[in-house]
Image: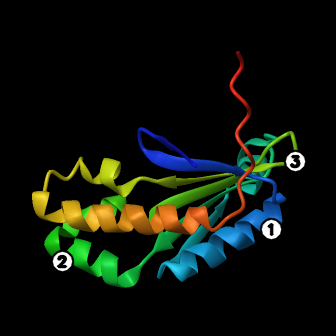
């Protein structure tokens, strides 16, 4: 799994449909449910006539953690739910990425939410780690 400035990403050998199902199941093991599903491919086709590979945005929520965050900072709802994206690649692999709540919560500037952000981040990483990943390409010499 790769960590970048605002999220975590992995490529999986699973096909797109299987990857979407695996993500939902993995999130469930960490107490998340999928509240929203945005089929970006279908939306862009319908609204713009644009073709693109399968791509979905899943809005994941862990209700007890969301409640803690909203109780501490009602405006944090602007940053909820935690988005997870799944999209098909040309090589028949699928990419899965999740937001890093620690990076996201730096916008809030509420130190008392740092532990919560770390907890949510760890849960999302554990969920993604349950999904089979492709081996990274060997480094060139």
Q: Considering the numbered disc 2 on the image, is that residue within a helix, a strand or a loop? A: helix
Instruction: Quadrant for residue 117, please give it.
Output: bottom left
| Residue at numbered disc 3 | 92
Residue visible at 46% across and 53% down? Answer: 99
Q: Estimate how packed mark 3 is, as few (under 14), some (14 to 19) or many (20 or more) residues with alpha carbons within 10 Å.
A: few
For the residues labelled 3 and 1, the Cα–Cα distance comes to: 12 Å
Q: Considering the numbered disc 1 on the image, is that residue within a helix, a strand or a loop? A: helix
Q: Looking at this view, is 18 or 127 the one in front?
A: 127
In the image: residue 44, left or right of residue 97: right
Q: Position of residue 6 (x, y in %)?
A: 42, 44
| Residue at numbered disc 2 | 71
Q: Where is residue 28 in the image (x, y as percent from the top left)?
A: 56, 81
Residue visible at 55% across and 81% down? Answer: 29
Residues at discs 3 and 2 in contact (Cβ within 8 Å)? no
Between marks 3 and 2 in the image, the one whose residue lies nearer the viewer: 3
Q: Position of residue 46 (x, y in %)?
A: 77, 52
Q: Looking at this view, is 45 or 60 the one in front?
A: 60
Number of numbered callouts drawn: 3
In the image: residue 111, left or right of residue 129: left
In the image: residue 6, left or right of residue 119: right
Q: Hey, which residue is sitting farthest left in the picture?
A: 111
Going from N to C along the chain, the mark reached first, 2 or 1, is: 1
| Residue at numbered disc 1 | 18
Going from N to C along the chain, the mark reached first, 3 or 2, is: 2
Going from N to C along the chain, the mark reached first, 3 or 1, is: 1
Q: Is residue 89 above or below residue 68?
A: above
């Amino acid at each position: 799994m790769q960590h970048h400035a605002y999220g975590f990403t992995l490529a999986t050998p699973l096909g797109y449909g299987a990857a979407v199902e695996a993500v939902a199941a993995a999130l469930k093991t960490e107490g998340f449910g999928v509240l929203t599903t945005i089929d970006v491919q279908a939306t862009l086709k319908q609204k713009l006539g644009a073709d693109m590979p399968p791509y979905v945005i899943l809005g994941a929520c862990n209700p007890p953690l969301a409640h803690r965050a909203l109780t501490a900072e009602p405006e944090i709802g602007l940053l909820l739910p935690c988005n997870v994206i799944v999209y098909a690649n040309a090589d028949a692999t699928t990419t899965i990425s999740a937001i890093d709540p620690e990076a996201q919560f730096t916008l809030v500037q509420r130190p008392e939410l740092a532990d919560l952000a770390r907890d949510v981040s760890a849960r999302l990483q554990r969920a993604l780690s349950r999904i089979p990943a492709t081996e990274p390409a060997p480094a060139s010499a």
